Image (tube, helix red, strand yellow):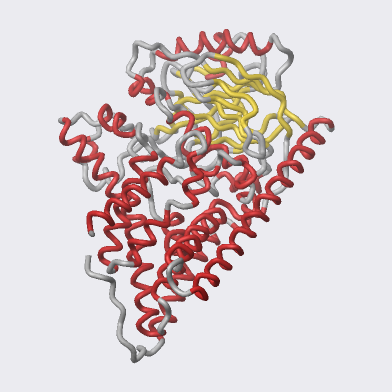
């Protein structure tokens, strides 16, 4: 019996994890939680923790099949030790659903014992806010949300504009709970089955309303963007993507300074190709073009230099185009702190401003816990020692646009991009480097996940990457143009400059907080009730 429950938890978690793959696998998210709810109902809270841990661990492993190869190459350890580290990472992510299942099952038992609530209904009902709260607050290597499984059907994710990713998490898990109750009561009394079938029908009506609203909003977005372009409130952009040398270890490309000459030559050549199609307001170069780290005062007092000479002099000597250019590099402030930075130049290649990376990538830009346990850094020698930026960047292109910059990992974090809207951001530039693992689905996953930021904030997202996938994503989440992984190419496009702040920016994380607050309130309500006089129901022995 225990083996069967474990198998169900692992299988359903793996199916949910596949929903994060490119394609339409996300349809299985609408039923993936049903087996988990089933095994949790028939278990003790302690067992529910184990089944939930197996579920989330399998979900993480299935969602990131490319990660083991990265761990293998990243950690300079024997093979058994690397396998152990990967298993430990999966187990850690398993805690997310494990804690949620234990809390939901314990709370259901409390209400059953003290208030006489039906255990099956209570377990299903309480698991919904528990799982939503876990998604919102559990710290993960990659902060993925259930909403990302639904990118194969864009009308469904338009809800993000109003409720953020938490809104779709409530819908998906709520539908799973209603579906589970129908299955569970199918052979029970007809009255009970009819009640749960009516509940499921109500959820389906909500989903149908969301579908209709999503289709309507997509048509409204098209009308608004067309109007802005007709009014001249637009930006003509060129993006280039080079082809990195294939004889190099992609894991260590970002450590090699000698690539600057390769990038500079390729980007300059591709930029001339882009300019041949007509005048441009902005060029975006995704990779480093500097032979060394450049020095600057701070994000506010920007006075960049390279090797003791003004940075602008170096750029003018090497960049043939006279178009405002944005490029990705590493800067060092007056205190010696190194930061990822995006520099914006004038048409004469004089640096105007920079944006710094605010959210660092765990194990890529820093070693979590490395300051407390230095041996962790020795185990992970390829991890950089980067510093967090001092402020987010909205770069002003004079007389044209205010551009919010997302740097790599930042495009995965819901809510972060919304902080740029009060600063006047009209379009997003998302500059990333997936060159450390661009042979699998990762570049396509990353692009799809970044598309949610366009939907949440109703802005165009210009995604420029070192080796793919670069793309133009419209405010409805559609991929307008793209360049595939390891391909060389040019994108020229005209994007509308949009303003206003969607409701999701105001709602923020409140729907996640609602889930956590609801759990706390249900716990207090259960504890305040007197124990019922009837016998306590326990799960069947496994």
- Up the image or down, 424 lies above or below 479; here it is below
Split into 4 quadrants, where in the image is the C terminus? Answer: bottom left
In the visual, does 412 lie left or right of 452? left
| Number of marks in the rendered image | 0
Q: Can the viewer see residue 136?
A: yes
- Up the image or down, 488 lies above or below 217; here it is above
Query: Residue 430: percent from the left, percent from the top?
Result: 55, 32
Q: Nearer the viewer, residue 90 or 401?
A: 90
Q: Nearer the viewer, residue 280 or 399?
A: 280
- Residue pictured at 70% horizontal, 22% vertical: 281
In the visual, does 348 lie left or right of 449? right
Q: Which corner quadrant of the image does residue 131 belong to? A: bottom left
Q: Nearer the viewer, residue 232 or 449?
A: 449
Query: Residue 193: percent from the left, percent from the top?
Result: 50, 70
- Residue pictured at 58% horizontal, 11% vertical: 270
- Up the image or down, 245 lies above or below 126; here it is above
Q: Which corner quadrant of the image does residue 219 belong to? A: top right
Split into 4 quadrants, where in the image is the N terminus? Answer: bottom left
Query: Residue 513: percent from the left, percent from the top?
Result: 50, 63
Q: Can the viewer see residue 403?
A: no
Query: Residue 276: percent from the left, percent from the top?
Result: 69, 9
In the visual, does 276 lie left or right of 144? right
- Residue pictured at 84% horizontal, 33% vertical: 231
Q: Residue furthest right?
A: 231
- Residue pictured at 40% horizontal, 84% vertical: 116
């Amino acid at each position: 019996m225990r083996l069967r429950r474990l198998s169900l938890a692992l299988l359903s978690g793996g199916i949910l994890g596949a929903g994060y793959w490119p394609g339409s696998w996300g349809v299985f998210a609408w039923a993936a939680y049903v087996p988990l709810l089933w095994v949790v109902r028939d278990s003790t809270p302690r067992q529910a923790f184990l089944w939930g841990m197996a579920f989330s661990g399998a979900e993480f492993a299935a969602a990131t099949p490319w990660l083991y190869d990265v761990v293998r190459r990243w950690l300079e350890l024997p093979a058994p030790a690397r396998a152990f580290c990967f298993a430990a990472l999966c187990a850690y992510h398993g805690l997310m659903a494990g804690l949620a299942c234990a809390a939901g099952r314990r709370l259901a038992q409390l209400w059953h014992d003290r208030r006489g609530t039906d255990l099956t209904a209570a377990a299903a009902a309480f698991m919904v806010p528990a799982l939503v709260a876990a998604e919102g607050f559990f710290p993960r290597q990659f902060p993925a949300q259930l909403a990302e499984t639904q990118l194969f059907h864009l009308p469904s994710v338009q809800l993000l504009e109003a409720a953020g990713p938490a809104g779709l998490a409530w819908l998906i898990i709520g539908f799973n709970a209603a579906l589970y109750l129908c299955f569970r009561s199918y052979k029970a009394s007809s009255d009970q089955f009819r009640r749960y079938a009516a509940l499921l029908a109500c959820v389906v009506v909500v989903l149908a309303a969301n579908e209709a609203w999503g289709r309507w909003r997509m048509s409204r977005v098209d009308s608004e963007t067309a109007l802005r372009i007709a009014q001249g409130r637009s930006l003509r952009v060129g993006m280039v993507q080079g082809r990195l040398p294939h004889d190099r270890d992609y894991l260590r490309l970002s450590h090699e300074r000698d690539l600057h000459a390769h990038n500079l030559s390729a980007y300059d050549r591709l930029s001339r190709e882009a300019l041949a199609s007509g005048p441009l307001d902005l060029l975006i170069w995704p990779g480093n073009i500097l032979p060394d780290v450049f020095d600057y005062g701070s994000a506010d007092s920007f006075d960049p230099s390279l090797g003791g000479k003004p940075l602008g002099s170096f750029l003018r000597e090497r960049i043939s185009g006279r178009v405002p250019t944005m490029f990705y590099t590493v800067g060092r402030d007056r205190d010696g702190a190194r930061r990822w930075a995006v520099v914006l130049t004038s048409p004469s290649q004089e640096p105007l401003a920079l944006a710094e990376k605010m959210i660092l990538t765990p194990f890529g830009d820093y070693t979590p816990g490395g300051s407390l346990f230095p041996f962790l850094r020795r185990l992970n020698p390829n991890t950089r020692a980067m510093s967090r930026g001092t402020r987010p960047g909205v770069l002003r292109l004079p007389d044209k646009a205010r551009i919010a910059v997302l740097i790599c990992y930042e495009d995965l974090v819901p809510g972060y991009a919304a902080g740029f809207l009060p600063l006047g951001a009209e379009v997003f530039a998302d500059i990333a480097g997936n060159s450390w693992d661009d042979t699998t689905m990762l570049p396509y996953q990353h692009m799809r996940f970044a598309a949610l930021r366009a939907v949440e904030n109703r802005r165009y997202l210009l995604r420029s990457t070192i080796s793919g996938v670069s793309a133009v994503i419209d405010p409805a989440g559609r991929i307008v143009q793209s360049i595939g992984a390891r391909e060389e190419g040019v994108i020229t496009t005209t994007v509308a400059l949009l303003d206003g702040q969607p409701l999701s920016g105001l709602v923020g994380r409140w729907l996640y907080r609602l889930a956590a607050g609801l759990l706390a309130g249900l716990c207090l309500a259960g504890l305040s009730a007197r124990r019922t006089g009837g016998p306590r129901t326990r799960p069947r022995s496994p």
